[in-house]
Image (spheres, rainbow, N blue to C red):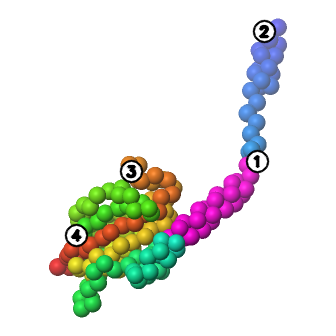
């Protein structure tokens, strides 16, 4: 009788100890989310491009240049005779002021020392600085995707804000100096 009870308990134990069944993955239509997001970004980009083009058209005395990177700029002070431009690792000293697309000041003029491509700086400004020579002043118009994009700067610049940056490059100290 005792053996029979042990066998019954073993059988009940084995039957009740089945492994958990695998959960079937939930079906998510991520493709539709990505498509919607891409469409929103295209519309935002078109809207910003139209706004920037209207600013350029309303300011015909300035010669705006379209960069290969997707922003616009014009020279306030252009240096013709110097050929040095910032390269990876160079230490640059510059002044800059940041405004929104309507010209409202976001950050007052400030001085900054920056190690080219080795420190954090928003994409447009980093690419714009590479176009500059010492003692040049350039005004850049950055669409939001070249500025702080969707996230903003967690301070004064919000989501999807195009920026105008007035920049003067003071000095370049080359990495191998």
Indicate the quadrant where residue 36 lies.
bottom right
* Sequence-first disc among 1 and 3: 1
Residue holding disc 4: 93
Say if residue 38 shows up in the picture. Answer: no
Compared to residue 134, the image places residue 26 above or below, namely above
Quadrant the C terminus occupies: bottom left
* Sequence-first disc among 3 and 2: 2
Residue holding disc 1: 27
Label 4: how many residues lie within 10 Å, few (<14), some (14-19) or many (20+)? some
Residue holding disc 2: 2
* Sequence-first disc among 4 and 2: 2
- Where is residue 44 drawn, in percent x and y? 59, 62
Label 3 close to label 2 by CB (< 8 Å): no
Q: Which of 116 and 101 is in front in this view?
A: 101
Q: Which stretch appears magenta?
A: 27-52
Task: Look at discs 3 and 2 and give the one toward the viewer.
Answer: 3
């Amino acid at each position: 009788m005792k053996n029979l009870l042990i066998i019954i308990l073993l059988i009940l134990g084995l039957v009740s100890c089945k492994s958990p069944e695998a959960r079937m993955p939930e079906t998510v239509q991520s493709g539709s989310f990505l498509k919607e997001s891409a469409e929103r970004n295209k519309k935002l980009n078109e809207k910003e491009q139209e706004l920037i083009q209207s600013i350029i058209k309303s300011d015909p005395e300035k010669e705006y240049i379209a960069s290969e990177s997707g922003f616009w700029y014009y020279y306030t002070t252009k240096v013709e005779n110097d050929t040095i431009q910032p390269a990876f690792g160079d230490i640059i000293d510059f002044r800059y002021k940041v405004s929104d697309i309507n010209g409202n000041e976001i950050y007052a003029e400030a001085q900054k020392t920056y190690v080219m491509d080795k420190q954090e700086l928003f994409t447009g400004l980093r690419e714009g600085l590479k176009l500059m020579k010492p003692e040049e002043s350039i005004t850049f118009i950055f669409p939001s995707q070249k500025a702080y994009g969707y996230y903003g700067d967690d301070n004064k610049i919000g989501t999807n804000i195009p920026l105008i940056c007035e920049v003067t490059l003071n000095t370049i100290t080359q990495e191998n100096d």
